[in-house]
Image (spheres, rainbow, N blue to C red):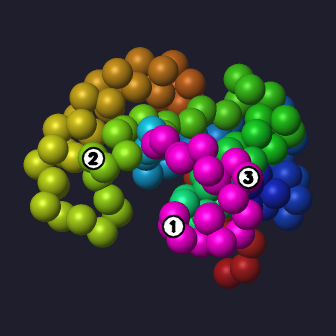
């Protein structure tokens, strides 16, 4: 969202000329216990799910805002679904599995990426201040 604001604000790029590739870390498929529906803040604090829900909500919200401003055909999101316990951002023990999954997802995503982004050649960058 920051890039969209920078492009249409200071750089004066029309919204119709902005295409976004948004790359997430992964979308963990989880199950939350039904007690959280009525449990209040203590249940959420004890479960440890609050941070995950807040972070995921923020990610979805920003993606939806970008789609609203630019149109769904101007925003491409890569955020593959994974099992809840499959990977962690700070865990290196499953690095080989992660590399294999990334290669698989990349092969499946490549045609969409090529169609949306590879036929465009950006103009040379010229700094505003020399």
Give the class, few, some or many, for how many residues have Cα within 10 Å of label 2's Cα (few <14, many ≥20).
Answer: few
The residue depicted at 29 percent of the width and 25 percent of the height is 107
Q: How many numbered marks does the figure carry? A: 3
Q: Is residue 96 visible?
A: yes
- Mark 3 lies on residue: 38
- Which dot marks residue 48? 1
Q: Which label sits in the foreground, 2 or 1?
A: 1
Compared to 52, does 111 lie above or below? Answer: above
Q: Quadrant of residue 97?
A: top left
Which residue is nearer to you in this view: 90 or 117? 90
- Mark 2 lies on residue: 86
Q: Which numbered disc flags the more N-terminal residue, 3 or 1?
A: 3
Q: Dominant secondary structure of the magenta stretch?
A: helix
Q: Secondary structure at mark 2?
A: loop
Give the magenta-colored segment's residue range. Answer: 30-48
Residue 50 in picture, x, y percent from top left: 61, 63
Give the class, few, some or many, for how many residues have Cα within 10 Å of label 3's Cα (few <14, many ≥20).
Answer: few
Q: Are marks 3 and 2 in contact (CB under 8 Å)?
A: no
């Amino acid at each position: 969202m920051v890039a969209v604001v920078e492009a249409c604000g200071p750089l004066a790029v029309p919204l119709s000329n902005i295409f976004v590739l948004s790359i997430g870390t992964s979308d963990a498929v989880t199950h939350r216990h039904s007690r959280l529906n009525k449990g209040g803040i203590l249940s959420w604090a004890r479960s440890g799910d609050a941070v995950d829900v807040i972070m995921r909500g923020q990610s979805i919200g920003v993606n939806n805002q970008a789609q609203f401003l630019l149109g769904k055909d101007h925003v491409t999101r890569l955020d593959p679904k994974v099992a809840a316990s499959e990977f962690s951002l700070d865990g290196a023990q499953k690095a080989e599995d992660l590399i294999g999954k990334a290669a698989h997802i990349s092969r499946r995503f490549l045609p969409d990426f090529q169609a949306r982004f590879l036929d465009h050649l950006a103009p040379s960058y010229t700094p505003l201040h020399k």
